Every structure is written in C-alpha cells, then in structure tokens.
Amino acid sequence: MNKMFSFMAGALCGALIGSVTALLLTPTSGEALKTSAKSRWQAAIDDGRQAMAAKEQELQLQFDQAKRS
C-alpha cells in the first residue's frame, strides 16, 4: 500500500511538473494554447462518453441475452 501511494504521488508530481514545463516552453500564445487545450479536453470527454455509451449498450445486450437463457 505504501509503495502504491509513493508511486501515485510521484506520478502525479511528474505529470504536474511536465504539464507546467510544457506550458512554459510552448511557442504559441496563451489564448491559442487555452483554446487548444479546451478543445482537446472537450474532445477527450466526448470520446469517453461515446465509449461509455457503446459499452453500456454492449453490456445491456449481454444482460438481456443472459436473462433469456
């Protein structure tokens, strides 16, 4: 448990440092970067929702088939 917590804390710190470094070293303006980040974030959320809906339909179909058996 302690090793897992240490790993997760290190991964979180590394991700934070990496994202701050990327923001500071990007050649685009702040507004363009914000717009790009928001659109990528929204695309990731939309992809996640689509994957969730597809999996939900698949599981519902499997459940209905199992109920009939």
Image: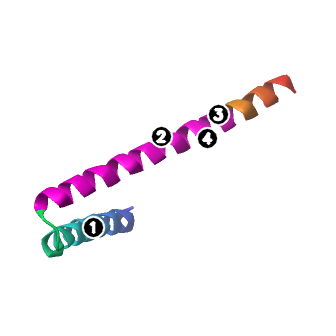
- Residue 68 horizontal side relative to residue 62, left or right: right
Q: Please tell me how crowded label 2 is: few (under 14), some (14-19), or many (20+) other residues with Cα within 10 Å.
A: few
Residue 15, labelled with which disc? 1
Q: Position of residue 30 (x, y in %)?
A: 12, 61
Q: Secondary structure at mark 2?
A: helix
Element type at mark 1: helix
- Report how far apart the C-alphas of labels 2 and 4 lie in the structure: 10 Å
* Residue at disc 3, secondary structure: helix
Q: CA distance from mark 3 to mark 2?
A: 12 Å
Give the distance between the C-alpha atoms of the residues marked 1 and 2, in whole angstroms.
24 Å
Q: Residues within 10 Å of mark 3 (few under 14, many from 20)?
A: few
Q: Which residue is mark 4?
A: 55
The residue under the point 47% across, 46% down is: 48
Dominant SS type (magenta): helix
Q: Are marks 4 and 3 in contact (CB under 8 Å)?
A: yes
Checking the image for residue 36, the label placed there is none
Q: What percent of the width, then of the height, locates residue 15?
A: 27, 67
Q: Which numbered disc, 3 or 1, marks the residue that appears first in the sequence?
A: 1
The span from disc 4 to disc 1 (Cα, nearest Å) is: 29 Å
Judging by the rendered image, the residue that carries numbered circle 2 is 49
Q: Which of pointers 4 and 1 indicates the residue nearer the eye?
A: 4
Residue 3: x %, y % from top left: 37, 68
Distance from the alpha carbon under mark 3 to that under mark 1: 34 Å
Q: Where 41 falls versus 52 (above or below)?
A: below
Disc assigned to residue 57: 3
Q: Is residue 7 above or below residue 41?
A: below
Please, what is the three-letter code of the amino acid marked with disc 3? Gln
Q: Residue at x 39, y 49 (%)?
A: 43
Q: What kind of residue is marked 1?
A: Ala
Q: Earlier in the sequence, mark 1 or mark 2?
A: 1
Q: Secondary structure at mark 4?
A: helix
